[in-house]
Image (spheres, rainbow, N blue to C red):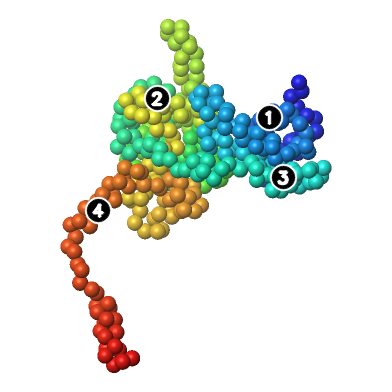
Amino acid sequence: MKKHHPKNERIKRAYLSYLEEAKRMSRQSANDAAAAIAMFEATTGWKDFAAFHIEQAKRFKRTLAEQVSPVTGKPLAKPTIRSRLIALRGFFAWLAEQPGYKSRIGRTDCDYFNLSANDSRIATARRERPVPEIGQIRYVLDNMPGETAVEKRDRAVLAFALLSGARDDAIASLDIRHVDLDHRTVFQDARTVRTKNRKTYTASFFPVGDEIEAIVRDWIAYLRAELKYGPDDPLFPATKMGQDDSGAFAPVGLERRHWKNAGAIRRIFREAFEGRGMPYFNPHSFRKTLTRLGQTTCHTQEQQKAWSQNLGHEHIRTTQNSYGQIPDHEQVEIIAGLRARARLAPANDDPDEETVQRVVKFLNRKASGI
């Protein structure tokens, strides 16, 4: 049985080029869309897209609902199903405008790739994720070893993530020259740093404590003085693997090159927290820690805007909506406090002055026959 259709392959290549060149989508996002389209093709037996029928969309949704994740062994999560359906809806909406497909695919046909209203609400529901407190992060840093070059680097990675608020992939691609210790800034240059949406901006060190800043300063001094690194060398070099004294394959030092991705940084975070008997907090959670710190530190709109920009956000709403949610347990405590204050407040059933005046005027009009 064939597992591809030549005509489909040609139109898919055109669509993926459209996503990357016209819609400015990243290669990874385009690949995700291609994977979803391939899944749909498999459910149709690789039929020509021009032979599309809404029953194919219905069958695809049923297939996704029945599919089991190879990682968890459980049914696919609703957000995963939603993202795949969005990819298919976008593809067929584009296909409906292409020659040879316009007369075969209607614009409303694409709507059959929508989730049900209930499933959409489940897929997009905001769920609270654990966020570390500053004290927890300091505890981990205080108890991390710092004897070898690898240990010093791992400790500095955590400290820098809190000090700068940078995302993990950006941290993995920074050079030493991007950090200005004199002005306490980090220049995230999208030409060489893997920033989100390839945005270039300068961030100042967040006010998280001199001891945390000192860890980063000591690390950079170590790179320059002990390892003889220059401005264009990586701020956080990759691990060099080799045979240790016992002949086992293990970390033996640092290589003068960047990490290819942020996977190693996430492993450092996991080992740092779980190694201290704490739950795993991923690198991105530190940005939420900083947002909550800003909520108690910033007292004017100007300060709030500066804090938001320092996180790389163009709009303060992004900081508030995506990072600034009050944790459920704090919400409960706040409402309980308000309830206690309401019980303690003296009851005041006397009408206010404005109400008294309106009643007097009404009675006067009644007495006058008005």
Three-letter amino acid code at the position of disc 4: Arg
Q: Earlier in the sequence, mark 4 or mark 1?
A: 1
Three-letter amino acid code at the position of disc 1: Thr
Report if the CB atoms under discs 4 and 3 are less than 8 Å apart: no
Q: Quadrant of residue 190?
A: top right
Report if the CB atoms under discs 2 and 1 are less than 8 Å apart: no
Q: Earlier in the sequence, mark 2 or mark 1?
A: 1
What residue is pinned by disc 1?
Answer: 43
**Marks 4 and 1, how far apart at CA:** 56 Å
Dot in front, 1 or 3:
1
What residue is pinned by disc 3?
Answer: 94
Q: Position of residue 147 (x, y in %)?
A: 35, 22
What residue is pinned by disc 4?
Answer: 339
Which quarter shows the N terminus? top right
As helix, strand or loop, the secondary structure at mark 3 comes to helix
Report if the CB atoms under discs 2 and 3 are less than 8 Å apart: no
As helix, strand or loop, the secondary structure at mark 2 comes to helix
Three-letter amino acid code at the position of disc 3: Trp
Q: Earlier in the sequence, mark 2 or mark 3?
A: 3
Dot in front, 4 or 2:
4
**Marks 4 and 2, how far apart at CA:** 42 Å
Q: Earlier in the sequence, mark 1 or mark 3?
A: 1
Instruction: Give the left or right position of residue 240, taking residue 40 as reference.
Output: left
**Marks 1 and 3, how far apart at CA:** 20 Å
Depicted 117 relative to depicted 175: above or below: below
Q: Position of residue 336 (x, y in %)?
A: 26, 49
